[in-house]
């Protein structure tokens, strides 16, 4: 674009000191982007430019490496895999903090109120299997992942990434729930009774995600679990424990989880990855 009109010195001074109103600012910037002589009149703050550029350059070329990554790298996890995993929404601090808070409250409530200890124990057994499923629902795709449009265009996107992320969030959620279970007063088997239901709900959610979107699959199975528990409960907490966590039920969870895993392996190419 060529023009006979150029920015006068007064306007350039106002632009430089940042006092122009938005409409005039836009006009000046439009002219500057097209006119090299006027651009040359703007004094460049070389030090500021150099600082900004080196900060950007450093962030891109030498990302900070935390202790967790160092540990995983030593265990053989390649760096690019780690980058994709740490971009998992359900592994963000906010999500981890929320999970930790829920578990801490459960443990604290169980220790503080001796009358309600058993009730809290039952509530923990019912809710602990849901936590990994909630984490899985946020492991991939919209609406949980604002980066999804970008992630989805990378060669690494797809079933393998969903499984990697699912395994990592299940791992983190299970470790957190296991710590809480160990701190919970009450019968020792509380600490492990929720593990097989959690395994079934997670593999079931992933298997169902070959048919539905991940959040919907998680919602359906989480809802089924809660409905099942509530209908088994009636009025007595003892009934929940006997019918939902007894040896027969545990065996059924294990078999169903194996079935879900088989479905998942057979249909793994059909993940509904949420592309609209
Ligand atoms: Zn000009």
Image (cartoon, rainbow, N blue to C red):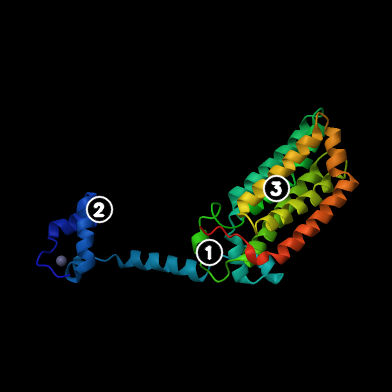
Q: Position of residue 260 (x, y in %)?
A: 75, 58
Secondary structure state at the residue bearing disc 2: loop
Q: Residues within 10 Å of mark 3 (few under 14, many from 20)?
A: some
222 versus 164 height, above or below: above
- Report the residue at 86% width, 34% height from top: 238
**Residue 229 picture quarter:** top right
Decide which of tag 2 and tag 3 comes sooner along the chain.
Answer: 2
Q: Position of residue 261 (x, y in %)?
A: 76, 61
- Residue 67 visible in rendering: no
Which of the two discs, 3 and 1, sits closer to the camera? 3
The answer to whether 46 appears left or right of 107 in the picture is: left
Secondary structure state at the residue bearing disc 3: helix
Q: Position of residue 172 (x, y in %)?
A: 70, 55
Check disc 3 and report the residue beneath it: 221
The answer to whether 222 appears left or right of 186 in the picture is: left
Secondary structure state at the residue bearing disc 1: helix
Residue 18 shows which numbered tag? 2
Tell which quarter ligand 1 is in: bottom left
Whether the residue under disc 1 has CB within 8 Å of ligand 1: no
Decide which of tag 2 and tag 1 comes sooner along the chain.
Answer: 2
Residue 151 shows which numbered tag? 1
The answer to whether 85 appears left or right of 224 in the picture is: left
Q: How many marks?
A: 3
């Amino acid at each position: 674009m060529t023009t006979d009109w150029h920015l006068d010195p007064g306007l350039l001074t106002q632009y430089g000191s940042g006092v122009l109103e938005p409409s005039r600012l836009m006009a000046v910037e439009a002219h500057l982007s097209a006119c090299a002589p006027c651009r040359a009149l703007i004094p460049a703050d070389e030090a500021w430019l150099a600082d900004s550029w080196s900060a950007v350059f450093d962030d891109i070329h030498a990302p900070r490496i935390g202790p967790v990554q160092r540990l995983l790298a030593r265990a053989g996890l390649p760096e690019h895999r780690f980058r994709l995993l740490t971009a998992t929404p359900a592994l963000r601090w906010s999500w981890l903090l929320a999970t930790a808070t829920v578990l801490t409250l459960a443990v604290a409530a169980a220790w503080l109120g001796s009358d309600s200890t058993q009730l809290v124990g039952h509530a923990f057994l019912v809710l602990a299997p849901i936590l990994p499923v909630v984490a899985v629902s946020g492991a991939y795709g919209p609406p949980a992942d604002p980066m999804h449009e970008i992630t989805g265009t990378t060669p690494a996107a797809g079933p393998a990434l969903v499984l990697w992320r699912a395994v990592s969030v299940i791992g983190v959620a299970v470790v957190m729930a296991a710590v809480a279970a160990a701190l919970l007063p009450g019968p020792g088997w509380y600490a492990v009774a929720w593990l097989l239901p959690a395994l079934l709900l997670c593999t079931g959610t992933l298997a169902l995600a070959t048919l539905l979107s991940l959040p919907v699959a998680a919602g359906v199975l989480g809802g089924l679990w809660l409905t099942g528990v509530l209908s088994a409960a009636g009025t007595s907490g003892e009934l929940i424990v006997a019918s939902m966590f007894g040896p027969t039920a545990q065996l059924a969870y294990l078999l169903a989880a194996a079935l879900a895993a088989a479905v998942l392996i057979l249909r793994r190419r059909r993940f509904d990855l949420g592309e609209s």
